[in-house]
Image (spheres, rainbow, N blue to C red):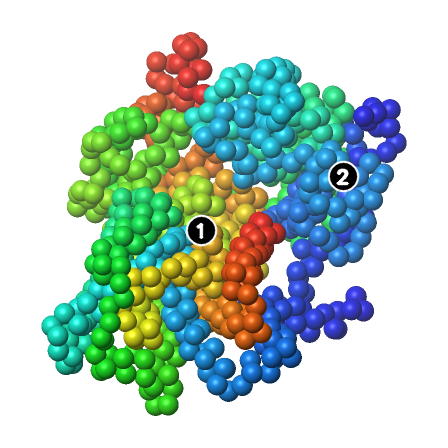
Amino acid sequence: MSVEQASAVTPLLVLSGVTKRYGAFRALDGVDFDLRPGEVHVLFGENGAGKSTLINVITGNVAFGEGTYSVQGRPAAGLSPQTLRAAGIAAVFQEFSLLPDLTVEENLFLGREMRHGPFVDRTAMRRRSAKLFAELGFDIPVSTLVGSLSRPEQQMVEIAKALMFDAPILILDEPTASLTDTDADRLFAVVARLKARGVGIIYVSHRMREIRLLADRITVLRNGRRIATIAASGVTEAALVEMMAGRPSGELYPAIRHTPAAERLRIENLATPDGLVRTVSLSVHAGEIVGLAGLVGCGKSEIGRAVFGLLPIAAGSITVDGQVVAAPHPRAMLRRGVCYLPADRGTEGLALNRPVRENVTMAALDTSTLGGGGLLRLRAEKGVAARLLERLSVRPPSPEPPVLNLSGGNRQKVMLTRGLVRPTDVFLFDEPTVGIDVGAKAEVYALMRDLTEAGAAVLLVSSDLPEILHLSHRIYVMHQGVIVRELAGAERTEEAILSCFFGSALLQDATTAGEAVA
Amino acid sequence: MSATAERPGRETLRAALRSPILRVIAPIVIMLVGFAIAQPRVVSPGNLLNIAVQASYLTILAAAQILVLLTRGFDLSIGMTVSLVSVVAALAMTAGGHAGPEAVLFGIAAGLGTGAAVGAINGALVSLVGVNPFVVTLGMFNILLALSSIVSGGFPVQGLPAGFLSLFGGTFAGVPVPVAAAVLVVLVVHLILGRTVFGRSLYLIGSSPAAARVAGVRTRLHLWAVYVLCSGLGAFGALLLTARTQSGEPNLGGSLALQTIAAAVIGGTRLQGGEGSALSAVAGALFVTVLSNGMDLVRVDSYIQQVCVGAIILASLVLDRWTAARRS
């Protein structure tokens, strides 16, 4: 493909005046967009601004009403996703397309195995995938089962799969949402290398760090309209956020009063059978946010799951309001006013093909207001759903369409209504802002502030360091299944947390650090 | 912009066309008209009543099947449950040699009890042990097939009490009992699904088992109970069918499993769980019944009929996959 010669003049793809209606609602409203070879073009906007719809139009997953679309000079409107993929558009979405029970190599070639006559040519595939991994700088053995890889590693495999056949156009939809900074840096190196090869990259992200690092141009979307397409050099974060939100940016992290009162949740010497949590003791009081920080795989997210009865417990005790909970399970914990909000909202948080209303109330069907005596109170349910959608400004605020139709941030808000739908005052947040934009983040933080100041006890498990630092009153840092440090007051600094990430035995021990990252 | 005025109306029409129930009713009417042109007897009052009665058995069994389908499950053993219940109930009724109301009641209790027991075992294996419903109910299919033959000796059980035949096969306020029973079952299932915590849980479990669990839904209990209810309703349908054939039939259930699943899917219930309704049982059962009744009356060869019904079942499954794929 002679992309290099044509690069100076012809854009890889051009959309102009693209409009997509869902009923009266315009998901895209006359949007212009183009992508040049060798550039990173960032799509920036709030949830529901139209980023996903635009990407789905580009990949052929959504048909649009008005406007034109061409790929490498040829009209592309109405082409199927398969045809567009063959035309050179590769996409990596937030939801992975990998099969956990197959090896990395089998996943890379899934459905397009290389052949030697009627037989699958394993040698050729091995050679090809090893070459690709070397080019991309990945050091994952291609014979590993995908299910045994960490999420960052799976992300790498997903990208490699998209790039298998030298696509000139790559779409990355929030590729760093589940990566630590170290892994993200490896991803950025890959992106830079692809750029140098002339690949045009559409990059969806909310994170300023990577936008500043990677972007050549930025297109800001709001309410389905293109607000601006600007060169990335010289644009300030404040200006971007203002364009995205349509109003001057406020402080992202709210100030939260710290008024610790009675101890609500106490964990003593907790261990899980898989060994991810070895001996953990911590406590959370009413009126405070307690942060739980650590690298991916350090065991921090397992703690919330174990407390809520989603993981078996090998040893230790969980105490809620002074009472030991012998065998925790979700229903019993909800009744004690404890609510776990899972990180993986797609599979664990929401029933995607059910109406928004049912998702709002699903954790409160045993309460007398909504489901007393085994019968549903539909009128009360409608009222509760409408009130909570309004309270968290879910858009669109309609209770009847399936959650499937909402954007990531709005899905998250629907899930968070769970904490408000029944009396709840101990919250276990597991990565509450993964993959949602700045606007929705601010709303989630404001909700956490309101809950805490109203006397709730909040345990915040997060890989987002600024989030932990700005919101938590106390911070526990975990390393390999153990809490290595508790930080309070002025000790809560980025340096202090980072130095604990690699264990108390510390940074000079490079092997430990390597393990921790993997 | 100029088109905005007419857009809402067109959208409503499109939404109506997309509604699963209408998508089924239209072809049913078209089929009736088509068959009536070839053979006017198809739309005679007598035959329409006949269609209603025939469809009511399938409606009840499809409603039972739908409950399980909603949870991403299957009940492949429902046809064999019908066979075994038929035989057991008939034997229980005729065992004492006298045909009093006690014998009838005993027979009904034995039949319903057998159904519930089958469902309890299916449910326990699926819900508590965690075995795939397909495998569980396929295994149960074979067990029940053999049991029906063993219990009956392979022959129909004759001589059912007249009281039983009029109770399950007569008319109620001028309406044939099976039709009244089907209306009642659909109403009850409709209310269970729309108005009870149990019904809501079935949708949530089918839509996302993990999310239902995290939300504190009693997934194990409800999953077990739905198999009991499914087989229990199957047993009720079996009693009605037994009254129709006037004997306990070890071969009564033959191809019912596939027919119920077909009716459910044709009516708009999704095999991937979490979407469906009691009304889809009515629509789907009517579709299948009108098709086979019409083909009977225009004298289509019975093997060709089987090919047609089979093809339509497969087509409905293909359609289910297509619409599912288009949405995701």
> How many neighbours does mark 2 have within 10 angstroms: few (below 14), some (14-19), or many (20 or more)?
some
Q: Which residue is mark 2?
A: A230
Q: Are marks 2 and 1 in contact (CB under 8 Å)?
A: no
Is any atom of residue A239 visible in this view?
no
> How many neighbours does mark 1 have within 10 angstroms: few (below 14), some (14-19), or many (20 or more)?
many
Q: Nearer the viewer, residue B269 or B60?
A: B60
Q: Residue furthest bottom?
A: B173
Could you tell me which residue is drawn at 39 percent across and 79 percent down?
B179
Between marks 2 and 1 in the image, the one whose residue lies nearer the viewer: 1
Question: Residue A78 location in percent, x, y?
Answer: 75, 49
Is any atom of residue A193 visible in this view?
yes
Q: Nearer the viewer, residue B268 or A41?
A: B268
Where, quadrant-wise, is the N terminus of chain B in this rendering? bottom right
Same subunit, labels 2 and 1: the answer reads yes
Vertical relation: A159 (above or below) B120: above
Question: Residue A15 location in percent, x, y?
Answer: 79, 45
Three-letter amino acid code of the residue under disc 1: Leu
Residue under mark 2: which chain is it in?
A: A
Question: Residue B205 location in percent, x, y?
Answer: 38, 53
**Residue A76 - label:** none
Give the alpha-carbon distance from disc 2 to disc 1, as whole Å: 37 Å
Could you tell me which residue is drawn at 69 percent across and 26 percent down?
A165
Three-letter amino acid code of the residue under disc 2: Ile
Question: Residue B209 location in percent, x, y?
Answer: 38, 49
Q: Secondary structure at mark 1?
A: loop
Q: Nearer the viewer, residue B310 or A243?
A: B310
**Residue A350 - label:** 1
Could you tell me which residue is drawn at 50 percent across and 40 percent down?
A434
